[in-house]
Image (cartoon, rainbow, N blue to C red):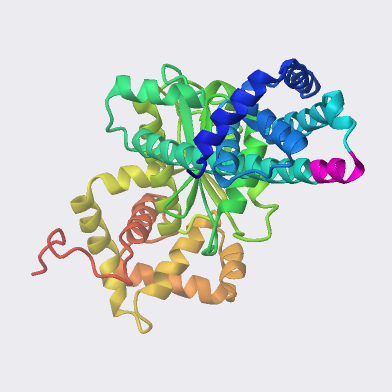
């Protein structure tokens, strides 16, 4: 009956028992020492394979090589580097050849050559299989970790998972959810086919700066997401604090600005909040910051929550905001060029500190053209941008127009006042 791999392994064990196997044990122990103490268990049936090759000239079977591949997977799962595993196998082969019984050494030259060829074939096939198995297991572990990591980040940012479950899942990633964290979001100025390079580069810098605990870097909806411990970033770990958000935004923006692709980057930073659900709150603030900065055409590359307080107040009561924009700015539609040029002039005028010459420079107009437009606003709306009492109303209305996308988009009909 034809031998199977299992039968052959059993026969090898019997032959090994019949001959003195002390030399194989010595070879295994020496190889383990050479490889820095890697367990001899990772050799599996490799030593009997070498012995069969050296003493009988037998080449390895597929089942035996598959067994070595499984040992490579075991090594990866145990955290043994592939280099140390390969060292173990190569050292074992060297010691087995050196420890060959005298009877083998006394064979004729042809027999010794055949034995050497068989041993080299075993070594070559086994090392390749071990490395392949190690790589396969490594890729699977990375995929599993990425999946677990992605699901954890999604739940942290959403804040919808059970607290005890979040705490347990976050612990392997070094997150202590009893402490205060903050979230930064980075948005590329141009659409990228992949932001993996940006994430990898940023993760290296963030980990170097803030340590490898309580830090996560990931991607979401085309953004780079950074979760960091408030104590490390210098942000006040007090919920509701309107002080600075620390160094996180500057570090993230500085690193991303060095990359060739994605510029100009915009970074929004949420405030630090304690607890597991504090991460979700900080994320929502950062997300609102990106959305608001784009809508309001804010030029600053780093947007903090305190920069958006006025806009948040205006946006909180949309019916009142619609009423303000409609009542104050709607008459500008009567202008020859429509409302947009006059609204743009008002926005630039307020952004430039209400200085006509600076406004003219920013709009590439003459000072006379700017003053004419401001006079036109006064005549159409009754509000004078030069009058301190009127200026606040006009400014609030212009900010509201930006929030609502007016006059490019019509005001929400349901909330707009009914014209007589």
Against 119, residue 344 (above or below) is below
**Residue at the image point whose x is 37% and y is 69% from the top:** 377
**Foreground pick, 51 / 216:** 51
Query: Magenta stretch: residue 120 in it?
Result: no
Name the side, left or right, on which 141 lies relative to 329: right
Residue 378: % across, % down: 36, 67
- Horizontal side of 148 relative to 164 (left or right) equals right
Q: Nearer the viewer, residue 183 or 391?
A: 183
**Image position of 288 (left or right of 208):** left
Give yes or no for residue 109 being in the magenta stretch: yes
Residue 45 at x, y percent in the picture: 62, 30
Residue found at the far bottom of this picture? 336
Give residue 279's quadrant in the image: top left
Which percent across, then down, holds residue 102?
A: 87, 24
In the rendered image, residue 85, in percent from the top left (x then y), is placed at 70, 31
Image quadrant where residue 128 sits: top right
Q: Is residue 128 visible?
A: yes
The C terminus lies in quadrant = bottom left
Magenta range: 108-116
- What residue lies at 29% left-to-right and 76% top-to-bottom? 333
At x 61%, y 51%, the residue is 198
Asked if residue 97 is positioned above or below residue 336 in the image, the reply reads above
């Amino acid at each position: 009956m034809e031998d199977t791999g299992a039968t052959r392994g059993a026969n090898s064990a019997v032959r090994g028992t019949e001959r003195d196997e002390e030399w194989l044990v010595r070879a295994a122990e020496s190889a383990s020492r050479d490889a820095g103490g890697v367990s001899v268990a990772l050799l599996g049936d490799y030593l009997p394979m070498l012995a069969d090759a050296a003493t009988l000239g037998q080449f390895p079977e597929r089942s035996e090589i598959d067994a070595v591949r499984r040992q490579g997977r075991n090594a990866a799962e145990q955290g043994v580097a592939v280099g140390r595993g390969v060292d173990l196998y190569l050292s074992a082969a060297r010691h087995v050849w050196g420890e060959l019984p005298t009877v083998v050494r006394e064979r004729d030259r042809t027999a010794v050559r055949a034995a050497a060829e068989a041993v080299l074939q075993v070594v070559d096939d086994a090392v390749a299989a071990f490395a392949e198995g190690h790589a396969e297991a490594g890729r699977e572990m990375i995929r599993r970790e990425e999946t677990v990591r992605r699901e954890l980040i999604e739940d942290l940012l959403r804040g919808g998972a059970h607290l005890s479950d979040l705490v347990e899942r976050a612990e392997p990633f070094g997150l202590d959810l009893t402490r205060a964290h903050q979230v930064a979001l980075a948005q590329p100025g141009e659409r990228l086919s992949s932001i993996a390079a940006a994430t990898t580069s940023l993760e290296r810098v963030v980990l170097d700066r803030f340590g490898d605990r309580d830090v996560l870097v990931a991607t979401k909806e085309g953004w780079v997401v950074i979760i960091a411990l408030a104590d490390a970033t210098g942000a006040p770990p007090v919920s509701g604090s309107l002080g600075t958000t620390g160094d996180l935004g500057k570090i993230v923006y500085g690193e991303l600005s060095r990359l060739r692709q994605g510029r100009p980057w915009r970074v929004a930073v949420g405030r630090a909040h304690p607890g597991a659900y504090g991460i979700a709150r900080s994320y929502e603030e950062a997300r609102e910051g990106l959305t608001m900065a784009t809508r309001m055409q804010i030029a600053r590359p780093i947007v903090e929550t305190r920069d958006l307080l006025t806009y948040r107040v205006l946006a909180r009561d949309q019916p009142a905001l619609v009423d303000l924009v409609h009542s104050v700015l709607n008459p500008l539609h009567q202008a020859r060029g429509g409302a947009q040029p006059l609204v743009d002039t008002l926005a630039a005028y307020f952004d430039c500190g209400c200085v006509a010459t600076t406004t003219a420079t920013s709009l590439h107009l003459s000072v006379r053209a700017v003053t004419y437009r401001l006079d036109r606003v006064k005549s159409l709306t009754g509000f004078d941008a030069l009058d301190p009492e009127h200026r606040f109303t006009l400014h609030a209305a212009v900010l509201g127009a930006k929030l609502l996308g007016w006059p490019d988009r019509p005001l929400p009909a349901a909330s707009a006042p009914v014209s007589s």
